[in-house]
Image (cartoon, rainbow, N blue to C red):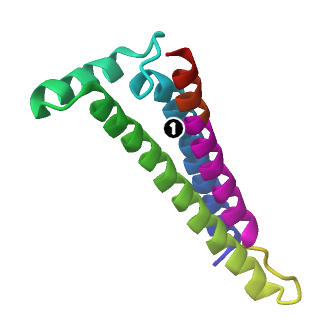
Amino acid sequence: MDTTQHQYNYIISLFFLSIGLGLLIFSLYIFPHLILHWHYKLPGFILEWKHFLMNYYKISATTSGSVLFIIFLSLAIICMLITNKLSNMSNNIITEVDIQKPVIRTRASLLSLQILLMIILIFMLGKMFQWLIS
């Protein structure tokens, strides 16, 4: 694979990384409103989509909010996995040329684990805060 293909992989990887991080931040932004029922301004399409799910599938507000949160979070995770795959393709190309340098792949998995733990921590803190208020 030549350098132009490596550059295209890098550009596409950065594109998916920015989309994935944007979706992750957006899903964390809509999380308290959809699941914990905090009241603040959200984009209209989120509220319309939530009400559509509630009316069409006859589910509760918390369930429809959870479905929307999971949709946006799973899209963020998919974009991050694509970024990771493209990054590993680039690392494999580099290591085939220069075998003496070790490849550290645990950084990406450690970062993914940290993001997952942060999401769980934010969820637990929100639930605890809601419990303290009520």
Disc 1 is placed on an element classified as helix
Image x and y of residue 107, in percent: 75, 65
Is residue 121 placed above or below 78 in the rendered structure? above
Mark 1 = which residue?
Answer: 23
Q: Which residue occupies 69% across, 79% down?
A: 93
Residue drawn at (48%, 10%), measured in percent from left and top?
A: 40
Q: Quadrant of residue 50?
A: top left
Residue 4 in percent (x, y) is at: 66, 65
Q: Position of residue 34 (x, y in %)?
A: 40, 25
Residue lying at the far right in this picture: please name it: 100
Residue 119: give x, y in percent of width and height.
59, 43
Residue at the location (29% across, 34% down)? 63
Q: Is residue 103 above or below residue 65?
A: below
Front-lying residue, 45 or 2: 45
Q: Is residue 15 left or right of residue 50?
A: right
Q: Residues within 10 Å of mark 1 (few under 14, many from 20)?
A: many
**Image point 52% across, 24% down: which residue?**
131
Q: Is residue 37 left or right of residue 84?
A: left
- Judge by depth and name the residue closer to the eye, 6 or 83: 83
Which residues lie in the magenta part? 106-124
In this picture, is 108 found above or below 127? Answer: below
**Above/below status of 81 relative to 125:** below
Quarter of the image that includes the N terminus: bottom right
Q: Is residue 107 magenta?
A: yes
**Amino acid marked by disc 1:** Leu
Q: Is residue 71 magenta?
A: no
- The front one of 28 and 16 is 28
Type of secondary structure dominating the magenta stretch = helix
